[in-house]
């Protein structure tokens, strides 16, 4: 409950307010009275005062001096100035001292209650944010593993976030990775020795493998280890800056980096075998830029892992940099529609099931008309699976409970054996996902949020603002923003910008449209402003991205 202090040298003013205002109904536990600034400070020292209502003109210490000192000693107090003076000088000074409100005498009860109620709501919002912050700190400290794994899963499964957001999360979870830096990914599978163990024992083995990896790689690399979304472990590594500087001074930097990495992997496998008495298989990707290419690297590594499982290559290490690169002119064009905004993840996120089904139909229609290989079937399977898995995890579901094929490399072989089987699986899985998540209370969002996603996701949605969206759903913009943040954890303005930037990325990459044309299509009036927003989101200008 809240405590309030009334201060006025004319005692009848404070006594009248103390008697006539329904304090208990407003949630105020105690009302204190003071006839001077000095007396008010004594009360402030003795009681946990939340709100001060004070007259400005008082002998000795004025109300402005009182709230200034109170603000320095008790910064969370809300101060309301009550005075008969309408001189702008006082209002200006009150603003400088961050007074919550400024009311002229004589004040009606209705106006007074409105002002105090505003201060109470302000306090409650602050306390709520304070509680959320400390809960976050508690959760972060109590289980870093879950937070780090969730962030890794988001990145692997295709979530796009701004560089600022990602850097904030990396710092918050104490992950010492740098963005726009070269990284290498290792997918680790446990050998047959571990299959006879129960779930708890396997978890202990996975934990031990992570500890061994972090210990053996730490001298040369920054590492990030966790359980991958699919049935394997993942070790992400960036070479430490001092090692990079040392190697860059040599002519054969890439060869030296390869030598250091391979030595570390060899040592890692040997230690796992010696201490845990079991073999592991590792798929090692080529070096890529983190986080820009992490999803593509993961998808390629999974494809190779499935092929390795099919070929029964337990205990092996596969370096993807050694494989023969396919000719670039044989790329499958059917995937272009899968990656075109709105993405499959976005459609599933906003529960646009019919649109998601249509998108998958378009992929298979285009694929059927094109030349494709077994590797292309893998890529389509993994792209769709990643989208399904991301949405299932976000809804608090386990994908393995919805479909057993999504995680088992051996069972997967039967799905990708033919075009028809893959297509049947995709639509069957979409139906299961729709049924499971539509029935899940955790996943179900309000109809308003669905409307927002549909508006922003539509082709004409890129010129929408928070206000125009609020008009569409018949809500005040502030209220809409509040419920959207509460439902999704993301600010509505941030979501609109993210969708615009994803659209911009697609147009820059897949069209020859000029920057000013893309600017107009996205609803921006000024190409310079669009360029500034794009750089803030991706760390480079549109021209730099296209030239790169």
Image (spheres, rainbow, N blue to C red):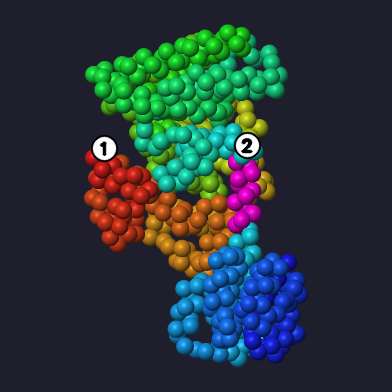
**Relative horizontal placement of residue 499, taking residue 53 as reference (left or right):** left
Mark carried by residue 548: 1
Earlier in the chain: of badge 1 and badge 2, it is: 2
Q: Is residue 77 above or below residue 256?
A: below
Secondary structure of the residue carrying tag 1 is: loop
Secondary structure of the residue carrying tag 2 is: loop
Mark carried by residue 16: none
Magenta stretch: residue 135 in it? yes
**Relative horizontal placement of residue 518, taking residue 450 as reference (left or right):** left
Q: What residue is at 23 percent from the left and 19 percent from the top? A: 251
Q: In which quarter of the image is residue 41?
A: bottom right
Q: In which quarter of the image is the C terminus?
A: top left
Q: Position of residue 16 (x, y in %)?
A: 71, 88
Q: In this view, does 170 lie above or below 3?
A: above
Q: Is residue 237 above or below residue 18?
A: above
Q: Where is residue 103 in the image (x, y as percent from the top left)?
A: 56, 83
Q: Quadrant of residue 505?
A: top left
In the rendered image, is residue 46 in sight? yes
Q: Main secondary structure of the magenta part?
A: helix
Q: In this view, does 153 lie above or below 106?
A: above
Q: Which of 118 and 476 is in front in this view?
A: 118
State yes or no: discs 1 and 2 in contact (Cβ < 8 Å). no
Q: Quadrant of residue 411?
A: top right
Residue behind mark 2: 143
Q: What residue is at 63 percent from the left and 36 percent from the top? A: 143
Q: What residue is at 57 percent from the left and 9 percent from the top? A: 273
Q: What residue is at 52 percent from the left and 21 percent from the top? A: 215
Q: Where is residue 530 in the image (x, y as percent from the top left)?
A: 31, 55
Marks 1 and 2 sit apart, C-alpha to C-alpha, by 39 Å
Crowding near the residue tagged with mark 1, few <14, some 14–19, many ≥20 C-alpha atoms within 10 Å: few
Q: Give the range drawn in magenta.
A: 129-140
């Amino acid at each position: 409950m809240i405590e309030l202090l009334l201060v006025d040298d004319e005692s009848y003013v404070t006594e009248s307010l103390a008697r006539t205002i329904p304090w208990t109904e407003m949630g105020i536990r105690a009302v204190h009275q003071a006839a001077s600034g000095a007396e008010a400070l004594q009360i402030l020292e003795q009681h946990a005062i939340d709100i001060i209502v004070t007259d400005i003109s008082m002998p000795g210490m004025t109300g402005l001096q009182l709230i200034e000192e109170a603000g320095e000693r008790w910064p969370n107090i809300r101060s309301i100035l009550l005075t008969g003076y309408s001189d702008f000088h006082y209002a200006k000074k009150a603003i400088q001292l961050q007074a919550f409100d400024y009311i002229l005498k004589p004040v009606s009860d209705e106006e007074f209650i409105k002002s105090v109620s505003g201060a109470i709501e302000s306090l409650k919002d602050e306390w709520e944010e304070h509680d959320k912050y400390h809960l976050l700190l508690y959760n972060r400290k109590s289980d870093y593993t879950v937070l780090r794994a969730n962030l890794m899963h988001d990145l692997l499964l295709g979530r796009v976030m701004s560089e600022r957001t990602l850097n904030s999360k990396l710092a918050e979870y104490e992950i010492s990775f740098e963005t726009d830096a070269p990284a290498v990914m290792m997918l680790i599978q446990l050998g047959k020795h571990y299959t006879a163990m129960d779930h708890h024992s396997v978890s202990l083995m996975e934990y031990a493998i992570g500890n061994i990896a972090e210990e053996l790689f730490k001298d040369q690399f920054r590492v990030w280890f966790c359980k991958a979304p699919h049935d394997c472990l993942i070790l992400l590594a960036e070479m430490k800056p001092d090692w990079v500087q040392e190697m860059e001074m040599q002519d054969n930097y890439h060869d030296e980096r390869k030598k250091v990495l391979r030595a570390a992997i060899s040592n890692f496998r040997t230690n796992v075998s010696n201490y845990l008495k079991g073999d592991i298989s590792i798929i090692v990707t080529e070096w890529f830029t983190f986080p820009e290419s992490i999803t593509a690297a993961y998808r390629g590594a999974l494809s190779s892992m499935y092929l390795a499982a099919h070929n029964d290559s337990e205990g092996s290490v596969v370096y993807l940099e050694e494989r023969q690169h396919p000719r670039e002119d044989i790329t499958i064009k059917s995937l272009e529609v899968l990656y075109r905004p709105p993405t499959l993840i976005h459609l599933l996120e906003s529960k646009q099931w019919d649109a998601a089904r249509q998108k998958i139909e378009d992929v298979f229609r285009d694929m059927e008309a094109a030349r494709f290989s077994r590797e292309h079937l893998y890529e389509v399977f993994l792209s769709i699976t990643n989208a399904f898995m991301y949405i299932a995890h976000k809804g608090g579901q386990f994908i393995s409970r919805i479909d057993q094929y999504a995680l088992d490399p051996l069972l997967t072989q039967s799905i990708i054996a033919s075009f028809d089987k893959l297509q049947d699986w995709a639509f069957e899985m979409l139906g299961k996902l729709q049924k499971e998540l539509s029935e899940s209370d955790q996943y179900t969002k309000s109809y308003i949020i669905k409307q927002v996603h549909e508006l922003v996701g539509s082709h004409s949605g890129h010129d929408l603002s928070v206000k125009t969206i609020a008009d569409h759903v018949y809500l005040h913009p502030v209220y809409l923003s509040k419920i959207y943040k509460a439902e999704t954890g993301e600010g509505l303005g941030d979501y609109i910008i993210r969708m615009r930037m994803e659209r911009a990325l697609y147009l820059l990459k897949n069209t020859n449209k000029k920057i000013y044309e893309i600017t107009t299509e996205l609803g921006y009036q000024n190409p310079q402003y669009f360029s500034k927003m794009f750089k803030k989101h991706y760390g480079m200008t549109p021209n730099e991205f296209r030239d790169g």
